[in-house]
Image (cartoon, helix red, strand yellow):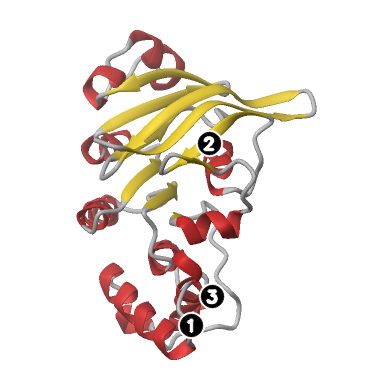
Amino acid sequence: MTALLEVRHATRRFAGLVAVNDVSLTLAQGEILGLIGPNGAGKTTLISLISGTLAPSDGELLFQGESINRLPAFRRARLGIGRTFQIMRPFPGLSVLDNVAVGALFGRAGGQSRLALAREQARACLEFVGLDKYIDQRADELGGPGRKRLELAKALAMQPKLLLCDEIMAGLTHVEIDEVIDLLRKVRELGISILVIEHVIKAIKSLSDRLLVLHHGEKIADGTPEAVLSDPVVVQAYLGKKRP
């Protein structure tokens, strides 16, 4: 498979703290890569380096073979890098439909040129994630599970080639987690590659083609879910005595 994303020796320092230290990874076209590790391991920082909300202190990031180090987040979004956020902040006062239309207006290749077209695209995304019944509701009135689906719809409206998901299953019930897993598999069927952060081990194991583990900002494992989750280093650093 062709590499869609390459991260080469990425490092991010915050004064004396090294949040991400010399991390390299590749993500192939059509692949789902799970990113796991303890709290504070550097997972969200790594996603922020890829999306452009943070700049690397060292290292290089390539998307479709081209360096994106110097590109701001909006330019990366127009190339096809979409993201959901762990802390969900819908645009206040806007409807569910118009929250997603914003993504359609500013997405890949510059987004839709007209609001009517953006809203049409937003409706399709909301139907895809199962929120089409709430299009006229104010987005800030949605509950937690609804806001997570809204985050996904906003990102999909940007027509990404790569989707970065930050704990999209956190706080959900077992039934809701299964629904999100099915949804992300359908996203992959659209030809979208996915990098997903998740702490629900059974979910990430069943969803991912590969797992990458961070600990204290460093990569300690990268491989198939079965191999990674049975690695003694991973068990000691992240899973403890319990194994999935």
- Most foreground residue, 66 or 17: 66
Q: CA distance from mark 1 to mark 2?
A: 29 Å
Residue at 43% over, 90% down: 116
Quarter in which the N terminus is drawn:
top left
Mark 3 surroundings: few (<14), some (14-19) or many (≥20) residues within 10 A: some
The residue at the far top in this view is: 232
Local SS, label 1: loop
Residue bearing the label numbered 1 = 113
Task: Residue type at mark 3: give it.
Answer: Asp
Residue at 40% over, 10% down: 233
Q: CA distance from mark 2 to mark 3?
A: 35 Å
- Against 24, is 52 above or below? below
Return the disc, 3 or 1, that comes first in the chain's sequence.
Answer: 1
In the rendered structure, the answer to whether residue 79 lies left or right of residue 22 reads left
Task: Residue type at mark 1: give it.
Answer: Ser
Whether label 1 touches label 2, CB < 8 Å:
no
Is residue 234 shown to the viewer in this render?
yes
Return the disc, 2 or 3, that comes first in the chain's sequence.
Answer: 2
Local SS, label 3: helix
Residue at 57% over, 65% down: 89
In the rendered structure, the answer to whether residue 227 lies left or right of residue 21 reads left
Residue 6, percent from left and from top: 44, 34
- Most foreground residue, 216 or 187: 187
Mark 1 surroundings: few (<14), some (14-19) or many (≥20) residues within 10 A: few
- Most foreground residue, 219 or 111: 111
Residue bearing the label numbered 2 = 61
Residue 147, percent from left and from top: 45, 66
Task: Residue type at mark 2: give it.
Answer: Leu
Residue bearing the label numbered 3 = 140
Return the disc, 1 or 2, that comes first in the chain's sequence.
Answer: 2
Is residue 107 shown to the viewer in this render?
no
